[in-house]
Image: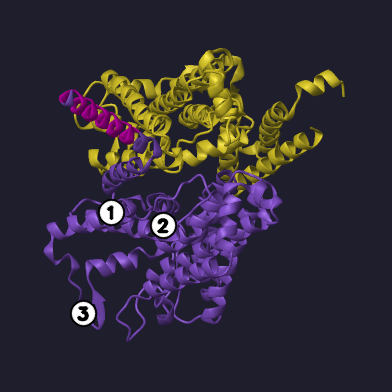
Chain colours: A purple, B yellow
Amino acid sequence: MSGKIKALTKNQLFLPFAMMVLVLLINLIKSPDFFAINIQNGVLYGRLIDILNRGSEIAILAVGQTLVVAVSAGTDISVGSVMSLTACGTCMLLAGYGVNSTTTLAVPLVVGLLFGLILAMCCGAFNGFLVSKLNIQPMVATLILFTAARAIGLLLCNNQITYIRYEPYKYFGNFIPGCPVPTAIFITIVVVAVVMLFLKKTAMGLYIQSVGINKKAARISGLNSSNICFMCYLICGLCAGIAGIVASSRIYSADSNNIGRNYELDSILAVALGGNSLGGGRFNMAGSIIGAYTIQAITVTLLAMGVSTDQAPVVKAIIVVLIVTAQAPAFKAFLAERKAKKLVQVNETQNKEAA
Amino acid sequence: MNKKVFDKLNGNTLLLVITICLFFFMYIIGCIVYSGKGFTHLQTFLNLLITNAGLICVASGMTCVMLCGGIDISVGSLVAMDCMILAYGMGKLNLPCIPLILMILVIGLVFGAVQGFLIGYMKIQPFIITMAGMFFARGMTAVICTDQISITETTNKLFYAWANFKIQLPAFLGYVNKKGKLQVPFIRISVIIALLVVAATFFLLKYTKFGRSLYAVGGNQTSAAMMGLDTRKIKMKAYILSSFLCSIGGICYCLNTMSGSVQQASGFEMDAIASSVIGGTLLTGGVGNVIGSFFGVMITGTITTLVNTNGKLLSSWANIATAALLCFFIILQSVFAYVKNRSK
């Protein structure tokens, strides 16, 4: 029995999951109706639904970010800006350049969405090219688009907020009529499922890990390291694009300055909270997704407790430091050492008593 | 080219030279294109120094951290927190400014020590810890006060006098404006502080044991440890230094803006990183120079000034131009690295 418990606590997913449960428990104590889900106007309402719904963007971003972290031991800090660019590109094409607000679309919805996603993939390809072919540190390479993508989005939208007041465009971030579950949850499930299948059913997951652990060794054993790395950045860009469309659809507009602001940080945090090492190599997708929803749960909890949006980061920071420190190998080693010392002491006293 | 000169001009020094040349090149282009809009006056250049004094201090600290292979993204929020403490302390609590400034410096040291301990001794990734620091400092700014507070003459005379104190340069550098009045170029206290910080950091990195060990740790941590350096301690010290310089930068920034608000100095950390990268500092550590970072700040500042002077261009062009420049420098660095590896 104790062996089983030990195996459970040793699992990478244990700590992230425990943290999530802890956050939810605190909520339950604070407000007993936390888990209550009721139906209003034919759609589901409740804090839990809210967390799942609002956490979608971070979860989608975390999927791409996990791959990037695993393959290149670096982070893609451009995802927030790419979200903004995607939203701007889509809205610009749908409304027509320079149009402030529209109720009819200039081009079919699908074309607009595809254009946005292609833009996002171009960004991903650009990052991937810099990192995989030119061997530039990921953070510096993505710093370029971090600075530029948002600005380009602003140019595309002619320096204003473009509103798309067209019902079907609102579906992605809100509800499809007749379906009580928020659409964003479905989108997240589809993205996660597709990427998971891709990783599990092909050998790609293994390839990514081996490139992340040792690029040269992977190449020598016959993998095209740089292509695998490139592909991960491409997927990360695509994920950012999907998240951008969801975020834009929520407010049925392209607010270049605010869409995806600080999301790069949240997505990296999600990866770290999931127990993944930012040093690359082994990764656990499920951990990252749990991490993403933990972040959202913390945010929702704080807001529910009446902490203002500006002040919430203080608590978030403290929680993050605690979680990360608890997971740190150095800290674990320190604890183990103390435990061993105690054992030795106990043994010594026992020996003395025996003598 | 003479081989001896060429040897001296290895990749890294060459990058520094390119950075400096590019700055002067851009500035001269600005002078030619916008000569009618006062770009040629010395004051425009000095204004560049005045507005970027805070960023220069912050970038100096960032360079030190990047040299030892780390990163510190908490700096922007820390600057905002410093400004808020100054503004709130003077504006709402009527405290004298010198204890407040001392308090800010101490906060910087403590903040850096905590981050440094977690990164150096607990071996947690610097990005995550300083990101937590960033959230913490930004949140604390909001906890102190969510309004925008400005510092005026009535709130604190001494600080106001410091902020408006003009250090006049010799009169012959001035020019006569349209009204026939002699305009003597001036700088402010923050510029002196910033230049002192750059000089001190340069000296620290070049001639002290600590500075050299930063390079050693950044270059190869394992071999640095084998040489007998305490890498954990050095890393911790680097973060303390960064946060301390950041606090000084916060004071310079506050002397310039004279206000405190929650969203102040957002994106400062990325500006500082971009400046360091343009200045030739590698994020992997071990290569870089504070002089380069100084010119990196000046280059980004010049781009912003050029876009602002034009007046017709959207401000987002400044971001795009900075990004393009960043791209150029990064690719140049990678080409140099490639050539270097090939010749080996």
Query: Dot 3 falls on which chain?
Result: A
**Quadrant of residue A202 in the image?**
bottom right
Image mark for residue A5: 1
Please provide percent x and percent y for residue B78.
Answer: 37, 34
Q: Which quadrant holds the N terminus of chain B?
A: top right
Residue B307, horizontal then vertical, whole percent: 58, 45
Numbered disc 2: what chain?
A: A
Q: Position of residue A302 (x, y in %)?
A: 23, 53
Tell me the element at label 3: strand
* Residue A341 highlighted magenta (yes or no): yes
Which mark sits nearer the N-terminus, 2 or 1?
1
Q: Amino acid at mark 1?
A: Ile
Count neighbours of disc 1 (C-alpha within 10 A) and say few if under 14, some if 14 to 19, many if 20 or more.
Answer: few
Specify few, some or many for label 2: CA neighbours under 10 Å numbering under 14, 14-19, or 20 or more.
many
In this rendering, position of residue B105 left or right of residue B17: left
Q: Amino acid at mark 2?
A: Ser
Answer with mark 1 or mark 3, whichever residue precedes in sequence: 1
> Which label number is shown at residue A40?
3
SS label for mark 1: helix
Check if mark 2's residue and mark 1's residue have beta carbons within 8 Å.
no
Q: Residue at x 41, y 51 (%)?
A: A262
Query: Is the magenta region chiefly helix, strand or loop?
Result: helix
Residue under numbered circle 2: A288
